[in-house]
Image: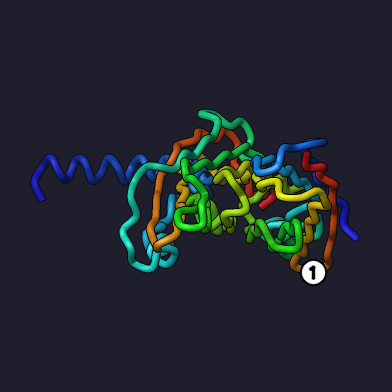
Amino acid sequence: MMLGRVQVPQSVKRGEAFEVRVIVQHPMETGFRRDLQGQAIPVNIVDKLACTYGGREVFRAELGTGIAANPYIAFYVVARESGPIEIAWSDDRGQEGRASALVDVA
Amino acid sequence: MNRRRFIAASASGLAAAALPARAQRFQPPQDVAPLIEQITGGVAPTTGGITVKLPQLAENGNSVPLQLAVASPMTVEDHVEALYVIAPRNPRPLVATFHLSPDAGRAEIATRVRLAGTQKVVAIARLSGNRFLVNETEVLVTSAACLDESM
């Protein structure tokens, strides 16, 4: 289980776009680095990240080696109903992670 | 070859030879035109309409804040479908792809990128109706990412 965090505003108005901020704890190994023995460290990148809200996917990202370690992504979503904002991601090793936050739509 | 050309050519050759090995390790910017064409499918993108916000100077290329914004109404008929970030000097130039939908409300993304040296970061937006926007921003990177000091 990988660690991650989602931040949303505490309450938003219906129909308004609000910012969702996601941060995942991950080294984002590029595959270009070597360890102390001179062995290449294999690539390990969070390559897929998706956000579901209100029963449908509202945002999806495909990340590459050019994204900094502990990837941070902020994007906007239109408030439709109160409920969880769920983020799911997976890395090159097949490890998966999830995080969610509740949004209260006034 | 006339005299003037000869002097210019030998001077540039000298300059390349004089560069320390360390500096030569930095990759020159790659030609990203084929990559852009692959994204757009041959459609000529319109320059502008998308803002690429980066600091003018990044001391460390390992984590550079990047903001993308497209002034789009984000309706079902007219919205941004995807945003692409390209760093031509990175070993793998395609940094990330973000897929948006009318559910986003605003076509704005913020993230942090790695940059292997001073370069012009290119962003492409794919709009509904197979239209494309492109823009670029130059960023000065003092210490590049992706390159291992021990190599």
Q: How many marks?
A: 1
Q: Quadrant of residue B44?
A: bottom left
Residue A22 left/right relative to B57: right
Q: Is residue A47 above or below residue B86?
A: below
Q: Between B30 and A22, which is closer to the camera in this rendering?
A: A22
Query: Residue at the location (59% across, 41% down)?
Result: B144
Query: In the rendered image of this protein, does residue B122 appear above or below residue A62?
Result: above
Secondary structure at badge 1 equals: loop
Specify the farthest residue to the right.
A1
Asked where in the image residue B10 lies, by quadrant, the reply is top left
Residue A63 location (% of width, % of height): 64, 58
Does residue B54 appear left or right of residue B31 in this picture? right
* Residue at 67% from the left image edge and 47% from the top image edge: A77
Residue B20 visible (yes or no): yes
**Nearest the eye: A20 or A38:** A20
Q: Residues within 10 Å of mark 1 (few under 14, many from 20)?
A: few
Q: Amino acid at mark 1?
A: Arg
Q: Residue at x 41, y 60 (%)?
A: B36
Task: Point out the residue furthest to the left here.
Answer: B2
Scheme by which the image is coloured: rainbow
Task: Decide: is A34 above or below A23.
Answer: below
Q: Nearer the viewer, residue B90 or A10?
A: A10
As drawn, the residue found furthest toward the bottom would be A94
Q: Residue at x 67, y 57 (%)?
A: A58
Q: Which residue is mark 1?
A: A93
Does the rendering let one see residue A40? Answer: no
| Chain under numbered label 1 | A
**Residue B133: x, y in percent?**
39, 50
Q: Is residue B73 left or right of residue A5?
A: left
| Residue B64 screen position, x and y as percent | 62, 38
